[in-house]
Image: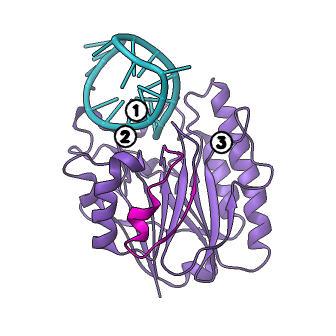
Amino acid sequence: MRLATWNVNSVSSRLPRLVEWLDLAKPDVLCLQETKTAEFPAAEVEALGYQVAAHGNGRWNGVALLSRIGLDDVSLGFPDEPGYPDPETRAIGATCGGARIWSLYVPNGRTVDDPHYQYKLSWLAALKTAIAAEVATGAPVAICGDFNVAPTDADVWDPSAFVGSTHVTDAERAALRALLDLGLVDIIPKPMKGNNPFTYWDYRAGMFHKDMGMRIDLVYATESLAGRVTGAYIDREARKGKSPSDHAPVVVDLD
DNA sequence: ATGCCTTATTTCATAAGA
C-alpha cells in the first residue's frame, strides 16, 4: 500500500501536475491540502481510478482524500473542531483499506502575537482529543498533511532564521509531541537529494534551488501501520518544473 | 532593512501563505 500527502496550493491550478503525478507515483491513498476550491475536479481523478472525498468551501484551505482501495465512513472535520470563528475546511477523514486516514491542514498561526496562533494551538489540542478517540478503538490510524510545525531544529534550513517565529515554538512542538504520545510514530521520509528532509520551500528568492526549506508535511501513524513501513521519501521532482506547488509530496510505502 | 512568488477573488488590488 502506498500512502501519500501533498499540499498542492490550489488543486485547480495544480490539476495538470496532479494528474501527471498520480500516473507516475500511483499512490493508493493521497491526502491533499490547500485545494482552495468548493468544487473539487472529481471527474479528472475518478478517470484515473480514484474515489474522491473533498471538504472545501472556496478561496482558502480545503482538503481532500483520493483512494483506489476504498473510501468509507467519511468525516468532514472532527468533533469539537475549533474555528475562526467558525470551523474551516481543514480536516477530512475516511477508512481506506482498513486504516483510518486523515488529511489535515493545520492553521498557519501567522505570528506568535496574532490570535491565529492561539487558534492554531487550540486546533491542535482538539485534534489530539479527536484522534485519541480513534486510536482507542484499536484501528490503524494515520494523520497526514501540512502541520505547519517543524518538529525539530533539523527540520528547518536555519534555526537562527526562525527565532521568534511560528512553526518552531515550544508550544507548537509540544502539540506535536502530544500527538505522538497517543502512540503515533513520525514516519520521517528520505529526501531524494541531500540530507535535509524538507517538504516545503518558499517560492521566493531561489529557496528551493538553495534547499532552504522546512519539514512541515508529516505522516504520523499508529504502530500497527508504522511497523509495516518499507520506505518513505519526499518527491522533490514534483517541486521542480512548470507551475509547481511550493510543497513536495511525501510518499510512504507499507507492506 | 526589505522584497523576492503564487494563489483566488465582488480583480488593475488585496489577503494569505510559512
Task: Name which of mark 3 and mark 1 comes first in the sequence.
Answer: 3
Looking at the rendering, the stretch of residues picked out in magenta corresponds to A37-55
Comparing labels 3 and 2, the label whose residue is closer to the camera = 3
Q: Chain of mark 1?
A: A
Q: Which residue is mark 2?
A: A158
Q: Secondary structure at mark 1?
A: helix
Spatial CA span between label 3 and label 1: 30 Å
Tell me, yes or no, whether the two marked residues, 1 and 2, touch with CB atoms within 8 Å.
Answer: yes
Task: Tell me the residue at 75%/80% (across/down).
Answer: A138
- Tell me the kind of residue under disc 1: Ala
Q: Which mark is residue A88?
A: 3
The chain coloured purple carries which letter? A
Discs 1 and 2 carry the same chain letter: yes
Q: x and y percent of residue A58 in the render?
A: 54, 39
Location of residue A83 (image quadrant)? top right
Q: Is residue A192 left or right of residue A125?
A: left
